[in-house]
Amino acid sequence: MPHHHTAPSPQTLQLRTPRPGDGTALWQLVQATGTLEANSAYCYVLFATDFADTCLVAEQDGQLVGAVVGYHPPREPGTAFVWQVGVRPSHQGQGLGLQLLQHWRALPANAGCRWITATVADDNAASQALFRRLAHGLGTACHVSPHFGAELFPSGHAAEPLYRIGPLA
Ligand SMILES: CC(C)(COP(=O)(O)OP(=O)(O)OC[C@H]1O[C@@H](n2cnc3c(N)ncnc32)[C@H](O)[C@@H]1OP(=O)(O)O)[C@@H](O)C(=O)NCCC(=O)NCCS
C-alpha cells in the first residue's frame, strides 16, 4: 500500500455538553486557566453528571480547551447561572469564550431562560468584558450589583458582584 503523507489533522473544535468521564478533565482545565478557583475533582464530576445539561465543553483533538460550568439556581426560575467559564491560555483571545457562552445560552436546558447571571471578581477585567460583550451581542442589558461581599469569603478573596444579563427573549 502506498504511504500517504497525511496532512495535519484539522483542528476541529467540538462544543458539547459534558459526559461523566469529563469530570477530571474539567477539573484539570480549570486549574490550567490559572485564574479560576479550582474546586474538588468530585465537584466537577457532579457537574459533568447531575448538571451536565447546563454545562458546555469545547474539545479539540481530544483535549478540553474551554468550558462553561453552570446551573439553574433553585430559587430563581428562569435564570441560568454561569458558575465558571474558562479557556485554556493557548486558546484565549480568539473568541472562544464568547462562542462558548453564546452556545451555552442556546442549549435546550437554557434556551427558555430570561436571565443569565454570573459573579465576577472586581479584579477580573477579561471576565467583566466577556459578560458585557455577551449582553451586547444578545441585544440586552448587563446590570451589575453588589452580591457576595468580600466578608463572606476567607480573607484575601475579592468581592464578587452579580452580573445580570437580560431580559432575554
Ligand atoms: C475570561 C475568559 C473565559 C475569556 O475567554 P476568551 O476566549 O479569552 O475571550 P474572547 O476571545 O471570547 O473575548 C470575548 C471578549 O472578552 C474580552 N476579553 C477577553 N480577554 C480579555 C482580556 N485579557 N482583557 C480584557 N478583555 C478581554 C474582550 O472584550 C472580548 O470581546 P471583543 O473580542 O469584542 O473585544 C478567559 O480569558 C479565561 O479563561 N480567563 C481565565 C479564567 C477566568 O477568569 N474566568 C472567568 C471567571 S468566572
Image: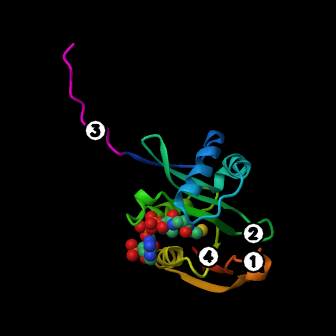
The mark found on residue 120 in the picture is 4
Q: CA distance from mark 2 to mark 4?
A: 21 Å
Task: Using the numbered discs, state the Cα–Cα distance from disc 4 to disc 3 in whole angstroms.
Answer: 38 Å
Residue 8 colored in magenta in the image: yes
Please name the residue shown 41% across and 57% down the image.
Answer: 90
Answer few, some or many: residues within 10 Å of disc 3's Cα (few below 14, many 20 plus, some between 14 and 19): few
Q: Which mark, residue 77?
A: 2
Q: Amino acid at mark 3?
A: Pro
Q: Are marks 2 and 4 in contact (CB under 8 Å)?
A: no
Tell me whether the residue at label 4 lies in contact with that at label 3, contact meaning CB atoms closer than 8 angstroms.
no
Quadrant in which the C terminus is drawn:
bottom right
Element assignment for label 2: loop
Q: Secondary structure at mark 4?
A: loop
For this rendering, which residue is in front, 8 or 100? 8
Q: CA distance from mark 2 to mark 3?
A: 46 Å
Kindly identify the residue that appears in the image at 43 percent across and 61 percent down.
Answer: 96
Going from N to C along the chain, the mark reached first, 3 or 1, is: 3
Q: Which residue is mark 3?
A: 8
Q: Which residue is mark 1?
A: 155
Q: Are marks 1 and 2 in contact (CB under 8 Å)?
A: no
**Is 94 placed above or below 52 here?**
below
Q: Is residue 136 visible?
A: yes
Question: What's the CA distance linking mark 3 and mark 1?
Answer: 49 Å
